[in-house]
Amino acid sequence: MPDQNIPHPIPVPSVEAIDFPALPLMPEAGGRPSGDLARLNLNEAPMSPSPLALAAAQEALADSHRYPDHHAGALAGTIAARTGITADRIVFGNGSGELLVQCAQVALDRGDEAVMPDPTFPTCGKGVQMTGAHIVKVPLRPDGANDVAAMLSAITPRTRLLYLCTPNNPTGNLLGEAELERAIREVPATCLLVIDEAYFEFAGGGGEPDTLTLLRSRTGPWVVTRTFSKAYCMAGLRVGYALCSDEGLKRGFSRIRHNFNVSRPSLAAARAAFEDEAYMRAAVAETVARREQLRAGLERLGFAVLPSFANFLTVRFNGSAAALAQALHGQGIAVQALGWPDANGSLRITIGAAEENERVLAAIENQLEAA
């Protein structure tokens, strides 16, 4: 029995020890985003969701006194029809971030290891720490893509999870077919292979690997995570999904999943948005066009711009990225400073509305001239 004379710290030390970036402060007066702040640090879409999605969410509000379908059968069936992954292998989360935490929880015990690129989306690493397992960080390639060869070399007999992010957040580059195929082939069957494709829809356009087809050859367990937050313009509705290698793995997620974790309006909106493929493709095309315009403007200002297959650009210049980000924030423009790949760091800039992109270019030019 615990000694009641010894105080038990709350939060417990294992929680206090979790290393995770501070969440950005984005105050909203009256509960709505302020137009005074250009939120180019969150990788949100600058446009609203499909009108069909908004109408579906509105209709679902009338049934808000009823819990949603915990298994999200209607949405699962819609996704299954397009992906070829049966509905009994699809699980949903409050954004794909929740599912990435659960990937660690279903695969890892205390003392196990998880191999991850560095830097990458930190949420899977948060889940690793929550299990008491250890993160093995592998530096990215200079072009911002995951270094598959180095990650495979980092596998040990204690490795139980290997996390790939393609396109990688926060750097934007993706893996080629040969690299992805090698990971699928060489990651041991005793290890869960997680492939985070939050920006999957932006990677289209030719030359990108078909992950689900390649995964058919894998004998070990795998998960592909995707989201409605980016290309479907639904970041505030919080819907992500995981495509699993088998029913047993899906059941593992179901055991740790919180009951009714995705709301009824969100599920309805996601299904309508998924079916409105034309709207999604138009939103992606518009974002990509603005991305290339922003790329040209930043290169004109002397920035080195990494390859991007996402809704953001990662850029470098001969100066402190953190200092420039702070100066821009003082002008009502939020961008993300990264401590990669060296002391100067780099900036990740979300593709915003046309006027926001023009505003950030003008502000950066003014800062550079004043320096």
Image: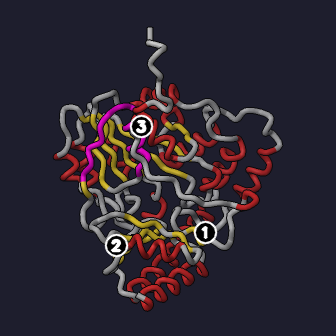
**Which callout, 2 or 3, points at the residue further toward the start of the chain?**
3
Asked if residue 129 lies in the magenta stretch, the reply is: yes
Give percent across and percent down for residue 73.
Answer: 62, 36
Q: Describe residue 136's horizontal placement relative to residue 309 as left or right.
A: left
Residue 190, quarter of the rendered image = top left
Q: Are marks 1 and 2 in contact (CB under 8 Å)?
A: no
Alpha carbon separation for disc pair 1 and 2: 22 Å
- Per the image, the residue denoted by label 3 is 103
- Few, some or many C-alpha atoms within 10 Å of disc 2 (few <14, some 14-19, many ≥20)? some
Give percent across and percent down for residue 56.
Answer: 74, 51
Most extreme residue toward the front is 5
- Per the image, the residue denoted by label 1 is 46
Q: Describe residue 72's horizontal placement relative to residue 111 as left or right.
A: right
- Few, some or many C-alpha atoms within 10 Å of disc 3 (few <14, some 14-19, many ≥20)? many
Asked whether the viewer can see residue 204, the reply is no
Q: Are marks 1 and 3 in contact (CB under 8 Å)?
A: no
Is residue 79 positioned above or below 313 on the image? above
Instruction: Tell me the number on the disc at residue 306.
Output: 2
Q: Secondary structure at mark 3?
A: helix
Viewer-proximal residue among 190 and 141: 141
Residue occupying image coordinates x 80% and y 48% = 59
* Image quarter (top left, top right, bottom left or bottom right) of the N terminus: top left
Residue occupying image coordinates x 46% and y 88% = 365
Task: Give the number of callouts.
Answer: 3
Is residue 11 positioned above or below 359 on the image? above
Give percent across and percent down for residue 11.
Answer: 49, 32
Q: Which amino acid does the dot numbered 1 rest on?
A: Pro
Q: Secondary structure at mark 2?
A: loop
Q: Which residues are magenta?
A: 122-138
